[in-house]
Image (cartoon, rainbow, N blue to C red):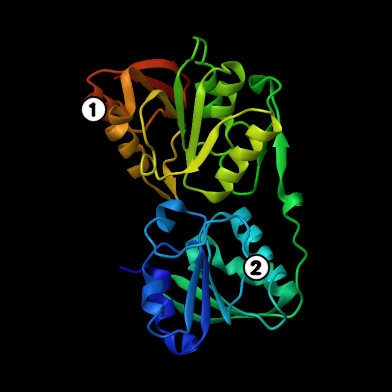
Amino acid sequence: MISLESEVLQRHLPLFSGKSILLAGGINDDFPQILQKHCQSVQVWSWYFDYAKTQSAVNFEVEFQPQSDLIIYYWTKNKQEVNFQLMQLLAKSKIGQEVLIIGENRCGVRSAEKLLEPYGEIGKIDSARRCGLYHFSLQKQPHFDLQSYWKCYQNDALGDLRIFSLPGVFSANELDNGTSLLLSTLTSPIQGKVLDVGCGAGVIGSMIKKYYPKTDVTMTDIHAMAIQSARQTLAENQLEGQVIASDVFSHIEGKFDLIISNPPFHDGIDTAYRAVKELIQQAKWHLTAGGELRIVANAFLPYPDLLAQHFGKFEVLAQTTKFKVYSVRN
């Protein structure tokens, strides 16, 4: 199966013949395998581990040095992420570098013209499947400095904990209300092994490690920028913890006394529950006897039914008009 964006690209296969190709951005299908039959070589740069783990050769790093005749960039709705990736790619590319930008209209791909016009020539070459395809030729390299993208914030709920984050990471610039409510429930002593699933910039896991230093904290996320951010948050606060790439429990070993999460339920511009369903369905296999799963979620989401189905009963530890914090025991 290939995406709508790749269907549009497939109409232009002669453009790729005999070239070295780099695919980057929000690619999430099997188009690289199709291209391999037509191209000299194919590389993929993806920040999404749920996709990267399914492919044979994907660069899953925040920084990347492009070396290809043609870059194909899949536009996403995350404007900060798009800006960070494209500016990095173009700053490290040679003058004359060719780039194809493909994206759905509803994701804002039209803004590619305004973003890239200062650095070269850009024009639309196709429109189909509710997508736009643009061709860009680099004439002026932008300046890119990774350090300038780092943000840091604190607030009363975090005490003296400082949160460090890169663009596009959840709750990158300020503490979100859901996480704040979840943190307010951490009033009883926490001990043993703790797993923070979908850690983002590392707020929850770092808070637990700071106030309960004897805990063994592991944080996971599927997003490369989140993993880098969580590691930076730990380091800057002189805290020890493990941060790994994992699609929910895909790369998790062992059992935990507490699994805690502000789980994502947005996938691009659509609402998706896959990750949360897997978290609830599989948590019991990763909890010690008597271990706890604690999550915060928008009050309207159908998590009570899932929790009751897989754990029998649940407790609401805190709630507002928008959020609820649920707790279940194994």
Q: Which one is nearer the viewer's eye here, 190 or 241? A: 241
Rendered position, 61 above or below 242: below
Left or right, residue 113 beside residue 204: right
Using the rendered image of the protein, determine whether residue 57 is visible from the camera's viewpoint: yes
| Helix, strand or loop status at disc 1 | helix
Q: Which kind of residue does numbered mark 1 sit on?
A: His
| Residue at left offset 54%, top offset 39% | 200
Left or right, residue 90 beside residue 245: right
Residue identified by numbered label 2: 89
| Residue at left offset 53%, top offset 38% | 243
What x and y, as percent, mark residue 258?
Answer: 41, 22
| Residue at left offset 31%, top offset 38% | 277
Position of the N terminus, as image quadrant, is: bottom left
Rendered position, 173 above or below 70: above
Q: Which one is nearer the viewer's eye here, 238 or 258? A: 238
Q: Which kind of residue does numbered mark 2 sit on?
A: Leu
Position of the C terminus, as image quadrant, is: top left
Left or right, residue 29 beside residue 68: left
What x and y, as percent, mark residue 141?
Answer: 75, 72
What x and y, as percent, mark residue 274?
Answer: 33, 44
Query: Tag 1 or tag 2, which sits nearer the N-term?
Result: 2
What x and y, as percent, mark residue 98?
Answer: 61, 81
| Residue at left offset 52%, top offset 78% | 21
Rendered position, 128 above or below 317: below
How packed is label 2: few (under 14 Cα within 10 Å), some, or many (20 or more)? many
Mark seen at residue 310: 1
How packed is label 1: few (under 14 Cα within 10 Å), some, or many (20 or more)? some
Q: Which one is nearer the viewer's eye here, 293 or 175? A: 293
